[in-house]
Amino acid sequence: MISFIVCEDEEVLLKKYEKEIEKFMMNYDIDYNCYTFDKYDKKFTELVKKDLGFKIYLLDIVTDTGTGLDAARLIREECDDWSSMIIIITSFPEYKYEALGKRLMLVDFINKVDNSDKKLKDAFQICMKNYDNKYKSLKYVYKKTAYNIEFKTIISIEKEQDSKICIIKTTHGKFYIQGSLNQVLKKLDNRFFKCHRSLAVNINQVESYNRKTNTIRFKNKEESELISRNKKKELFNLVRGIC
């Protein structure tokens, strides 16, 4: 679940942002809610403190009842929430350096009168990349048990010999899934790399790859030498972060 929380004191703009969010989310098969406010009041503060899943804030920097910077400070410092995405949008560009200097980990500072629609869309895309890294999961059923395994916890997927089953190794244990390695990979995203006909790895879980010994070392300190000759260069570049 994604929760968009918007505070804007101009009604026309508030409705415009709602439509922009609706239009943007049409590209994703993800449940979301949009909460709107025209001021930073008690109701806004109460919502900030609730567990609403992945939050994306769109905050007006200047209102009659407070500022977006105060709201961002509430989110980061008082609520100790450093995972939610915060976008500041304003018609007062002079606040930009003050906002960035507060070290509030803002996604963007957008000027309402400077190509704001395009910049808002770009900021939302950054937010979705963070959502994918944190919350995407592999959902399937195996032997009448339903599984929901977060992508970020998967270390590798290995094809079991002489069977139609794959072994999913995660940071908290092993799980089994019906199907070929290619079939499983279709359910995952581009952080997973097939380095051998029997093995795919989560690049984000790789600590190092030694081309000389052809050895992958994972962050949990396990190792594997299942790397095809024609995959060495690509794997090396992926771990270096240049692909």
Image (cartoon, rainbow, N blue to C red):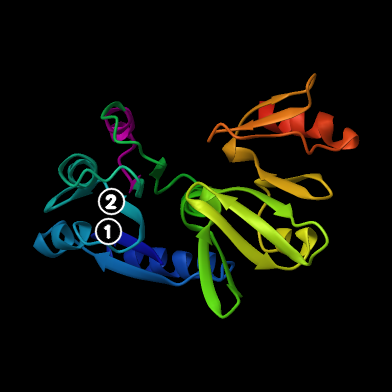
Res 210 → quadrant: top right
Give the mark nearest the N terminus, 2 or 1: 1
Q: In this orientation, does residue 118 appear?
A: no
Residue at mark 1: 8
Q: Residue furthest right?
A: 230
Within 10 Å of disc 2 (Cα), the crowding (few <14, some 14-19, many 20+) is many
Q: On the image, which quarter does residue 165 sit in?
A: bottom right
Q: Are marks 2 and 1 in contact (CB under 8 Å)?
A: yes
- State the image coordinates of residue 99 (x, y, percent, origin top left): 29, 33
Q: Position of residue 185 (x, y in %)?
A: 72, 58
Residue 210 versus residue 43 in the image, above or below:
above
Residue 6 or residue 202, whichever sits in front = 202
Q: Which residues are magenta?
A: 89-100
Q: Could you say which is closer to the camera, residue 204 or residue 113?
A: 204
Q: Which mark is residue 52?
A: none
Q: With 184 as the anchor, is 24 left or right in this view? A: left
Residue 60: mark in rendering: 2
Magenta-highlighted stretch: main secondary structure?
A: helix
Residue drawn at x 52%, y 49% is 152
Q: Residue at x 53, y 76 (%)?
A: 145
Please state the horizontal and vertical placement of residue 4, each as a whole percent of the image.
36, 62
The answer to whether residue 91 is magenta is yes
Residue drawn at x 16%, y 56% is 40
**Cα–Cα span, label 2 and label 1:** 5 Å
Q: As shown in the figure, which amino acid type bears the numbered disc 2?
A: Asp
Residue at the farthest top position: 212
The residue positioned farthest toward the bottom in the image shown: 144
Where does residue 131 sit, x and y in percent of width and height?
Answer: 47, 54
Amino acid type of the residue that numbered disc 1 sits on in the rendered structure: Glu
